[in-house]
Amino acid sequence: MIQVKSVSWPKGNTDIQTHHSVGVRSRRSLEDYLCYMPMNTLLAAVEAGAKEMTRFFNGTFTVTNKEGINNLVTEADHAAEKAIIEVIKNNFPSHFILSEETGELVSDSDFKWIVDPIDGTVNFAHGIPLCCVSIGLEKEEKMIMGAVYNPFINELYVAEKGKGATLNGKPIHVSKQTNVLNSCLVTGFPYVYLETPNGPLQVFEKLIKLGIPVRRLGSAAMDLCWVAAGRFDGFFEHHLQPWDSSAGFLIVEEAGGKVTDYAGNHYSPYQPHLLATNGLIHEQLRSYLI
Ligand code: IPD
Ligand code: CA
Ligand code: CA
């Protein structure tokens, strides 16, 4: 179980100092009170989603196809989404929710929860433990919190705007690599082939021809978190949706990294292109994308 272990009493809903750990639960009454705060709801929501993922993983579940070939959705995606939405609704019934499989639960609220119940569904469906729950929270159209939780490798990434990023409660930082030629990169490919100049395969080919290792994990949220943790020096993808990147891009920024679109503008999850790096190789890598 994910728990907020030590908390300085809140001055405002988002003004909390938290230390996140996975495994223990105590201090029931404090926890009950804190359930009404966004960070606690965020952690309870990723935990609820991860519980459903774990329940179905490597078991029997129905799989159906969405647009494109092998764009899968499983029974577990729906179960995780239902559990996550229930947690958010129980704590913040008036908040807007945008969730991959359900769509928009529209509300006139400054707060918007952006949910990917399982990022890396194809991995999940094949029993590959590179998949996670990803949830971001926007306030007045700015991302203020994000959490990504992979229960299979026991990694919980959390970020709060201006307060840094953590992996299982410990601060994380992007890498210090300054040369793109010595970098280790990661990318992803859309479910439907993109017939655009300088598309995903062309960029991939350019980088591979230069001898740069470019991995493909199959979970954009994990890709972003692994940039934040300094494992990858950069990640780019040509066609992402808000739920793929909303939590992860804040986690990269709070770990000291840089996230933009391909033109170098500050990143918005409502457009498709994402380039996330340690900041130091950003312009070098961007030159191969345009
Ligand atoms: C997908 C994954 C994948 C990325 C795709 C996404 P899903 O999300 O993040 O890595 O390449 O663009 O759609 O479908 O597993 O939630
Ligand atoms: Ca996704
Ligand atoms: Ca998904």
Image: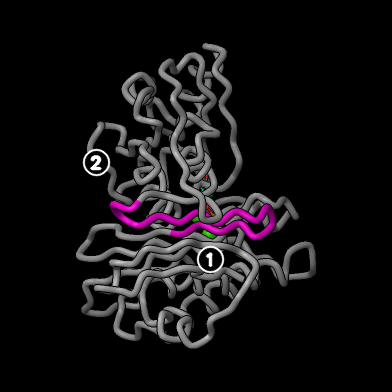
Which residue does the numbered mark 1 point to in the structure image?
A: 117
Residue 159 falls within the magenta-colored stretch: yes
The residue that appears at 52% across and 11% down in the rendered structure is: 210
Q: Which residue lies furthest to the top in this view?
A: 210
From mark 1 to mark 2, how far is it between C-alphas? Answer: 26 Å
The residue that appears at 51% across and 74% down in the rendered structure is: 44
Q: Nearer the viewer, residue 170 or 37?
A: 170
Q: Which residue lies furthest to the right in this view?
A: 59
Residue 54: which quarter of the image?
bottom right
Q: Quadrant of the C terminus?
A: top left
- Classify mark 2: helix, strand or loop: loop
Which residue does the numbered mark 2 point to in the structure image?
A: 266
Mark 1 vs 2, N-terminal side: 1
Residue 288 falls within the magenta-colored stretch: no
In this rendering, does residue 192 appear at all?
A: no
Residue 105: which quarter of the image?
bottom left
Residue 90 vertical position relative to residue 177 in the rendered view, above or below:
below
- In the rendered structure, which segment of residues is drawn in magenta? 147-163
